[in-house]
Image: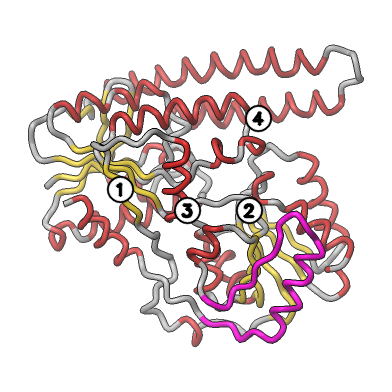
């Protein structure tokens, strides 16, 4: 069996999100254990012209210089969007600058993305890495995000499916559909369009939690020919590791939150709690990059960072720094309004943190016993949750490794 393992979006971004960490971990497991799994693994990227092969060394060690043209265009787009947002924020009411900032910059960015995408496809094809559809026993497997891609690159997979290649995608969450307030209307349309293509093209769709699977069934028509499977993710901190002996002493009343700084993660509540209550006796560290969508919140975090020694915002933390922060924190918190799986929750638990989590079905599904839950709309509920944690002895989660996850994944594929 040959596995065509998708690394498209992970190759297109230099930042490391939860999904990209999943892709990197599983890619390494598959590649290193090919003989054990009795399969051949080929890393690929999707393009309008078809699948393009990627050397594992290029994937494992790619730096900013290795980013594809598509990624470069996104980086430029992000900069122009931030400029547009700043212009809008400073515009006088009725000046017309708001409309100009978005319409003109949006048009420019859209054209840039279109042309860079086409150039990227041409460059990759010119390198003669295009994989032709064959009748061999192949499986296209994507654990990567699908919503940011050119729809035509997803449609191109139908040619491979028609020649016998099985197509498997993981849908990590349906947040752009279930929580539309946290995304733009244009992104919601792109997500729904690409999800429809994925559903029509796939032989099987994977979900990291039963909660995500339930959301899918609520919002998508049931297709009897499409197999739906739930498979819980692994963790970078494996059950086989004797982590407790490696951990530094916990800092009393220290909190850590991990995740991208955006509206969905609800850092507004944590910032408000810290300003009004927490600064008196707690320390709070937020580890998460900005996605440029919450400029006002970012300013709040920067002010807290400069005014309070017990508050820290790490916007570009390495894996080593993340490990250190998690190992020292007494309490791991997640105030998120929505999650597909909540990988940071598992990793915080694996590092011996007590857990204070927003009361979501997915959190109750994946978090170990002993976690305390609160209403993510209420600062007082958050504070009550902290009091409940006072008498809780933390226990390390026994969640599985990426090795175990990959083995179960192959059982589904076969």
Q: How far apart are marks 4 and 2 (CA)?
A: 18 Å
Position above or below: 238 against 111: below
Tell me where the magenta segment starts and ends, as one range: 369-395
Q: Name the residue under label 3.
A: 211
Upstream in sequence: badge 4 or badge 1: 1
- Label 4 or label 3, whichever lies nearer to me, is 3
**Label 3 element class:** helix
Image spot of residue 165 (x, y percent): 17, 35
Say the numbered circle drawn on residue 288: 2
Q: Residues within 10 Å of mark 1 (few under 14, many from 20)?
A: few
Q: Is residue 13 left or right of residue 274?
A: left
Picture quadrant of residue 322: bottom right
Residue 22 in picture, x, y percent from top left? 41, 54
Q: Residue at x 73, y 40 (%)?
A: 294
Residue 240 in sight from this viewpoint: yes
Mark 4 or mark 2, earlier in chain: 4
Location of mark 4 (residue): 79
Q: Which of marks 4 and 3 is nearer the N terminus?
A: 4
Judge depth for marks 2 and 1 and give the one in front: 2
Q: Which of marks 3 and 1 is nearer the N terminus?
A: 1
400 or 104, which lies in front?
400
Residue named by callout 1: 57
Q: Is residue 175 magenta?
A: no
């Amino acid at each position: 069996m040959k596995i065509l393992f998708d690394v498209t979006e992970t190759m297109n971004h230099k930042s490391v999100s939860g999904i990209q960490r999943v892709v990197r971990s599983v890619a390494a497991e598959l590649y290193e254990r090919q003989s054990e799994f009795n399969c051949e693994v080929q890393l690929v990227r999707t393009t309008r012209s078809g699948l393009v092969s990627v050397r594992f060394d290029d994937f494992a060690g790619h730096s900013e210089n290795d980013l594809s043209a598509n990624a470069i265009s996104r980086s430029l787009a992000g900069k122009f969007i931030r400029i547009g947002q700043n212009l809008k924020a400073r515009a006088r009411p009725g000046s017309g600058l708001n409309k100009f900032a978005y319409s003109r910059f949006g048009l420019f960015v859209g054209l840039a993305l279109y042309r860079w995408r086409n150039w990227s496809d041409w460059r990759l094809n010119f390198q003669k890495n295009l994989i032709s559809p064959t009748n061999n026993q192949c499986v296209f497997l994507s654990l990567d995000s699908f919503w940011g891609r050119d729809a035509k690159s997803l449609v191109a997979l139908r040619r491979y499916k028609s020649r016998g290649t099985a197509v498997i995608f993981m849908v990590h969450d349906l947040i752009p559909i279930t929580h539309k307030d946290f995304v733009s209307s244009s992104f919601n349309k792109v997500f729904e369009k690409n999800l429809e293509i994925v559903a029509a093209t796939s032989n099987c769709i994977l979900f990291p939690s039963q909660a995500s699977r339930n959301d899918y069934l609520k919002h998508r028509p049931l297709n009897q020919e499409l197999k739906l499977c739930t498979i819980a993710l692994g963790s970078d901190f494996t059950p086989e590791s004797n982590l407790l002996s490696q951990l530094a002493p916990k800092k009393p009343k220290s909190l850590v939150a991990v995740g991208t700084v955006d509206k969905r993660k609800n850092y507004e509540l944590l910032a408000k709690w810290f300003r009004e209550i927490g600064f008196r006796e707690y320390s709070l560290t937020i580890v998460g990059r900005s996605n440029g969508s919450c400029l006002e919140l970012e300013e709040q975090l920067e002010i807290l960072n400069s005014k309070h020694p017990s508050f820290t915002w790490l916007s570009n933390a390495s894996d080593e720094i993340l490990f250190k922060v998690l190992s020292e924190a007494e309490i791991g918190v997640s105030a998120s309004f929505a999650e597909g799986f909540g990988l940071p929750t598992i990793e915080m638990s694996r590092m011996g943190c007590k857990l204070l989590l927003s009361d979501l079905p997915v959190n109750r599904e994946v978090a170990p016993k002993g976690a305390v839950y609160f209403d993510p709309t209420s600062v007082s509920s958050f504070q009550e949750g902290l009091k409940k944690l006072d008498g809780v002895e933390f226990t390390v989660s026994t969640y599985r490794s990426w090795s175990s996850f990959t083995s179960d994944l192959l059982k589904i594929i076969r």
